[in-house]
Structures are given as structure tokens and as C-alpha cells.
Amino acid sequence: MNESLQTQRKEQILDAALAVIVSNGYDNSRMDDIVATSKLSKGAIYWYYKSKKDVYLSLVNHWVMKYSAVLNLIIDKDRPAAKQLESLFQYFIDQYENDPDVFKALLEFWTMAGRDKDFNKKLQKVYTEFITFISAIIQKGIDEGQFKNLDVNITAMSIMVNIEGIMWFTLFKRQNMNARDYIQTISDFILAGLTKKQQEVIS
């Protein structure tokens, strides 16, 4: 089997796994459900993945690779740090509106992380890398004199927590609020708090 067909099969399996976990939750998902949803044979599924857990750990890896490629484009050395953060917020709200199922699945994975060491290790690694990514933007803004001299790690963690807030819109939908309004308001607050006032820049 050539590499492109293998990649296509894996994506077909992972797309099916996402649909199953969103519909059933992790605990109530079965390999048979993934088989039925993927429309592949059971043998084809087990050729690539030995268990349900293996499938879902692989799904996390799949997202990391997919999103990392886009996020790395956000860190453009020629763009101000504030613009990079704006692009970061915009990217995640676009992702939520285009594919909210990913955020629903992440809630399931965080639940698993509380009781399964492999999921815990996987998600800790993912979030550590994401915080490092945000920290690089914050540090750039500080170095260039655009941002206040704040604790980089705490600031990055605060931004990550607010981005994670999008996930709660998958559970609690308010008639008078939507995810885009939420993120836009939060990003405005964050950028206002980070950015030096004009007199601070001059001095």
C-alpha cells in the first residue's frame, strides 16, 4: 500500500473516531463504532491501531501536526507581536466556528487526562508546547518595547486559559452571547493590558 493511501486511510479512521467520541463520549465509544462510522473493515482499523486508546492518542497527534503548521505561520518576524496575538485569537475562533467537534473532543480528553497517565502525558506535552509558542510572542513584544515587562509564563498561561474558554461554548450556549463576541472582547482586554501606553513608549 502506498504512503498516500495509508495517510488517507488513517485520516478516514481518525475522522470517524472524532465523530464517535463527540456522539458517545470516550467511555461509551467502541472500536466497533469507529469501524462502522469509517466504513472500513475491522481488519483495516486494527492494521493501524491496536486499541481504542491508541486511536484517540493518535488523534491528538494528528491535531498537533495539523495546527502546528498553521500556528508557525503566525510567528512572522516582520509582524508586530500584537498582530500575531490577534491572528492567534482569530485562528482559534475560526476553528471553533468551522469545526466545534474538535473542542468537544478536547473536553473528553481532558477528562481522560485526570485518570489515565498516557492521556495526561500527551496533553501536558501539547499544552507545554502551546504555552512556549505564546511565550515567544509575548517575549517578542517585550523585547521590541510594544508590551509591558510582565511575567512571560504567567501571561502566556492566562492567554491559553482564555482561548480554552471557547470550549465551554460547546457545553453552555447563551442566547445573548456567542464565541466570537467572547473571544473578541477577551482579546481586546488582553491586548489593552499588554500594550504599553504611548507615554510609556516615549519615556
Image: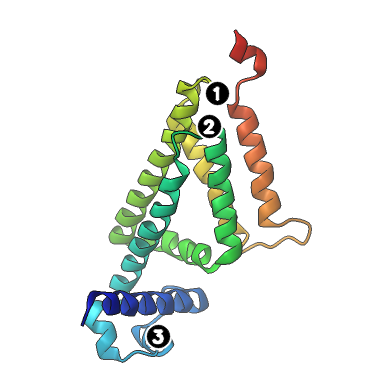
Instruction: Mark 2 vs mark 3: give the one in front.
Output: 2
Front-most of residues 3 and 134: 3
The reply to whether residue 171 is visible in this rendering is: yes
Q: Is residue 87 left or right of residue 7?
A: right
SS at badge 3: helix
SS at badge 2: loop
Q: Which residue is mark 2?
A: 80
Residue located at (42% from left, 79% from top): 16
Q: Position of residue 20 (x, y in %)?
A: 45, 79
Front-most of residues 97 and 51: 97
Q: Which residue is mark 1?
A: 146
SS at badge 1: loop
Q: Position of residue 185 (x, y in %)?
A: 69, 43
Q: Which residue is mark 3?
A: 38
Residue 29 falls in image quadrant = bottom left
Residue furthest to the top in view is: 203
Residue located at (39% from left, 48% from top): 127
